[in-house]
Amino acid sequence: MELTILVCFVAYTALLFLVMWVTSRRGTKGNEAFFRAGRKSPWPVVAYGMIGASLSGVTFMSVPGDVLANKWFYMPMVLGYVLGYAVIALLLLPLYYKLNLTSIYSYLNQRFGRRSEKTGALFFLLSRLLGSALRMYLVVFVLYEFVFRAWGIPFWVPAVVFIAIILVYTFSGGIKTVVWTDTLQTTFLLLAAAATVVAILNRLDMGLGDLLAASSEHGYTRMFNTDPMAPKFWVKQVLAGMFITITMTGLDQDMMQKNLTCKSLRDAQKNVMTSSFLFIVVNILFLCLGAALIAYANQTGFQLAVDAQGHVVGDKIFPSIAFSLSGFTAVVFVLGMVAAGYSSADGTLTALTTTFCYNFLDFGNRKEEGGTGFSIFNLQLSTLTVRRLVHVAFALLYLLVIIAFRPFHNDSLINTIFDVAGFTYGPLLGLYAFGLFTRRSADDRWVPYIAILSPVLCYVLKANSKQWFGYTFGFEILLLNGLVTFLLLLLAHKKAPHHSSLKNQKS
């Protein structure tokens, strides 16, 4: 079985390299292809590919596994995603296209100043590096546990292999390649989930309706938690879903860079709204998968993996059952995991490189690719060479985060990732809200300090809220973080505006 899985892994990787080869030979090349894909991407391709980029290994693993502990309480958050995508389509995309941005954090420079731009970019780098590395970690962890460990291969080896492959196929094409490889990754993610559901239904000799009815009787398909004090109260879930989408998509260079490769604003808007409705259907599929996995375990007596405290490890439910069902489900699971791993990292690696190059190295004002755009340690380097060096550096940093996290993996990673996002994306939410909805100009000197203080205050409040108020914060800590940032910016605003209001900003 391990050999079969290895062959499938190699075959899928070869397919990715074929896509890379084809896309790199056609049309725009160099930095323009890497950063913007020549703004020629067909919007249906971007919309379909964004499903895989949004899902990643976390949805693939943690959402089905989380059904055992939290039922379908994730669904109200998915409904909130649609509201968030509408805000992106109607408010943020028109701004980005009007200003003709490559990195979306360049807006903060135009609105407030250079320090604000670097602060926003730095928080994105931190947020995406941690969040995406955790997604990638989950893929490496599962493949190590179920495949490579049996061969006596240490954990860091598959991690190095994954990062090296992603680095190679994004090295030249960048976002131009990622837009097309995302479609391949989306297909295999969905195929793996659907095939596993069908295999379980066949094994249990029941239809989808029977499965949902049985799951409903046991309460597993319950969507709405009506306890206002609970972390997953449905109203909080909807609001959290909306603002998580605004921040983790609309204020995220990784996700928006794909949208900014569309031919026009209208195409980008169609892409975003199409993705939002597809996302509902896809998440229902993964929640049904979770219900199927639980039904299989209950009816067959399958022993689910537990931790040292005897708690079921949600992230191991799907892989353990997939590997026990049949060779076919094991193979499609591995293909789905590999697809999830690549989709978690390729676009992110490109976006990290883009953000650093534009917001810290000022690529927007350096037009030369073959000339000497930089002088480093008395070496004259072109922007093309510098971009490649930055790309490699982020790949190495990515790898270090993945390896370093292993001793701390003891919870469903979807909760860990959203906890991280609540603290790191909050300042971005506050900065953009202040820029878009007020005519005031924050004092650029104070923005970095505010962006640090706000998450610290929110962390202290979250850690003590149950003891102080009898209330437990969930994902809505993101909203509070953004609000605190907004209020602190009000206190630090300038009397004389640094820039005009949004209506008067020039592209």
Image (cartoon, helix red, strand yellow):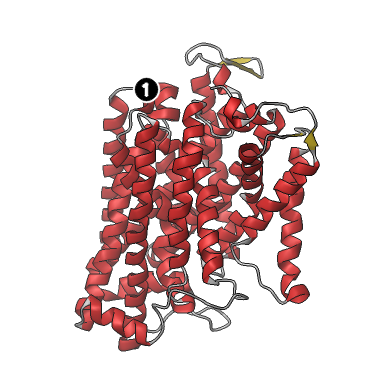
Q: Which of 236 and 363 is in front in this view?
A: 236
Relative to 83, is 105 on the left or the right?
right
The one nearer the camera, 207 or 197, is 207
Residue 64 pos. (x, y %): 40, 70
Residue 436 locus on image (x, y percent): 61, 38
Which is more toward the observer, 315 or 428? Answer: 428
Q: In this view, does 426 lie above or below 111?
A: below
| Count of numbered circles in the view | 1
Residue found 31% across the figure and 85% down from its top: 214
Residue 143 appears in the picture as rendered = no
Q: Is residue 245 visible?
A: yes
Is 14 above or below relative to 456?
A: above
Label 1: element kind: loop
Residue appearing at x 50%, y 40% in the figure: 91
Where does label 1 land, which residue? 29
Three-letter residue code for mark 1 = Lys
In the image, residue 250 above or below residue 152: above
Please state which of residues 420 and 433 is positioned toward the viewer in this rendering: 433
The percent coordinates of residue 373 (x first, y second) are: 57, 15
On screen, residue 142 versus residue 209, left or right, reads: right
What residue do we see at 53% from left, 29% from top? 389
